[in-house]
Amino acid sequence: MIDKQSPIPIYYQLEQYMKEKIEKGEWQPGEMIPSERELAEMYDISRMTVRQAVNNLANDGYLIRRRGKGTFVAAKKIEQPLKGLTSFSEDMRARGMEPGTIVLSFETVPASQKLAEKLGVTEGDDLYEVRRLRLADGLPMALETLYIPVHLVPGLTHDVVSGSVYEFIEKEKGLIIGSAVQTLEASVARKVEAEHLKMKEGAPVLLLERRTCLVDGRPLEVVKSVYRGDRYKFMIEMKRGGS
Amino acid sequence: MIDKQSPIPIYYQLEQYMKEKIEKGEWQPGEMIPSERELAEMYDISRMTVRQAVNNLANDGYLIRRRGKGTFVAAKKIEQPLKGLTSFSEDMRARGMEPGTIVLSFETVPASQKLAEKLGVTEGDDLYEVRRLRLADGLPMALETLYIPVHLVPGLTHDVVSGSVYEFIEKEKGLIIGSAVQTLEASVARKVEAEHLKMKEGAPVLLLERRTCLVDGRPLEVVKSVYRGDRYKFMIEMKRGGS
DNA sequence: TGTTTTAATTGGTATAGACAACTAGAATAT
DNA sequence: ATATTCTAGTTGTCTATACCAATTAAAACA
């Protein structure tokens, strides 16, 4: 299986070999793969070499590593490699600004009829409701309200929501985000929004609503954001492909 | 700079330190950073630890490694491609409404400095300027101003612009549209816009600017649109792919 | 003067080993 | 029964070393 004399690097041979196992379904999504030490012994190579192979596959989204538990096969990928899912923090940093967050509230609420429909739960089910003020270079940029079904991400804490929720969901929970539908519309700031965003009532704002789903299709969250119209421009790049 | 006693991993400390240098511009794009061996000696850490930091930044697109040459600061990131190139007509039909067009003006104007830059022509070059009121089910939806270099699409007529310009460009001229960059921002209607769109001055509007390029990369057109904030919602769908 | 060789420097691959942080279950004490 | 502690197994971090492969520039040579 592994040819040490080959000019092809060992880590790369192992990487391809494991990738094949995943793509052929020999290793099923969610299944734990042999531990690093096992793999190292199995092929009589160094554990660090194994790590290089595993790390590459983890970076590519094929595997998910969990300290103390093991390494697991990730859920299947979606065919079309279309990126563009960015968090507020990434977005701001890409614009050359330093992102910040102030958590305004964090509680559990019963799902309204509308939210239940969007999140694929039954009315009255528990949802986390997080309201955050997002800052850019210390100045208010957006007011954000986020809803996540409790049963999907149990253990969400005030600490977590003051940082990156996506990171928590992906790294700690091992859930993989697959797609999102986003709508943008223009509106004017209402009183509460104006107060938080430090702008005049009636000033233009950009309303953004995003519904994020996991790779298996289950809705994960609904985020409603109010961006300052004078400070925020939404940009997208489109390329014509097939279909 | 590096605190070996800190619970924060050394590679991570180094990673953040280097990232900061890049983001602050202390290390300029294209510049070569110290070699791995130099960094290792500089901070009295192992070269493998340096490699972990450098690799992470390289994977994130901050650095570019070149065997035998060195490691260099990457140019700034490019936006990710998204699908969704649609014309106003397609967009409206997809929403179940009948599109319509009223041509307000159609003339040839010299390129301003800003437009010339966006369209890759020299200041003063001839541009078509088309102003159209776009209707949905007979009601005003958007006010649109469109600029196209004359030399790219000679023979554009009033008749053509009262229909689909894209269709003319693709079918009659044989030019193929490849990509577009679009920005959206919230604003309020000014007097003339309010009059055409039949809304009150100061009502919310969505400003949309799109620059379209041909497959060979030449800029084709710049469109600036003002959409009624109460009637129009912009929607995009994003999917995450791998690698 | 032009060409080839050599040496030095760079990142790339690989090893062996050590300890830390974390997890889950087993063993133990209360 | 119920906590508590222990233990084995996992990934994470880090070191020190060695050699390979690509590149470049200086040195040697024709």
Image (tube, coloured by chain):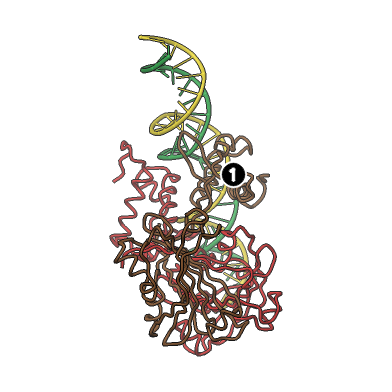
Chain colours: A red, B brown, C green, D yellow
- Whether residue B12 sits left or right of residue A21 in the image: it is right
- Neighbourhood count class around disc 1 (C-alpha, 10 Å): few under 14, some 14–19, many 20 upward: some
Out of A152 and C19, give the one closest to the viewer.
A152
Name the image quarter holding residue A26.
Answer: bottom left
Find numbered disc 1 in the image and state the secondary structure of the residue it sits on. loop
Q: Look at the picture and state if B240 lies above or below B134.
A: above
Name the image quarter holding residue B150.
Answer: bottom left
- Whether residue A193 sits left or right of residue B93 in the image: it is right
**x and y, in percent, of residue B6 in the image:** 66, 50
The residue carrying mark 1 is B28
Q: How many marks?
A: 1
Q: Chain of mark 1?
A: B
**x and y, in percent, of residue B17 in the image:** 63, 48
Q: Residue at x 56, y 79 (%)?
A: B193
Q: Residue at x 31, y 59 (%)?
A: A23
Q: Look at the picture and state if B217 lies above or below A141.
A: above
Q: Look at the picture and state if A41 lies above or below A98.
A: above
Kind of residue sitting beneath label 1 = Gln
Out of B240 and A185, give the one closest to the viewer.
A185
Quadrant that contains the C terminus of chain A? bottom left
Name the image quarter holding residue A104.
Answer: bottom right
Residue A174 can be seen, yes or no: no
**x and y, in percent, of residue A45 in the image:** 38, 42
Out of B26 and B210, give the one closest to the viewer.
B210
Residue B78 can be seen, yes or no: yes
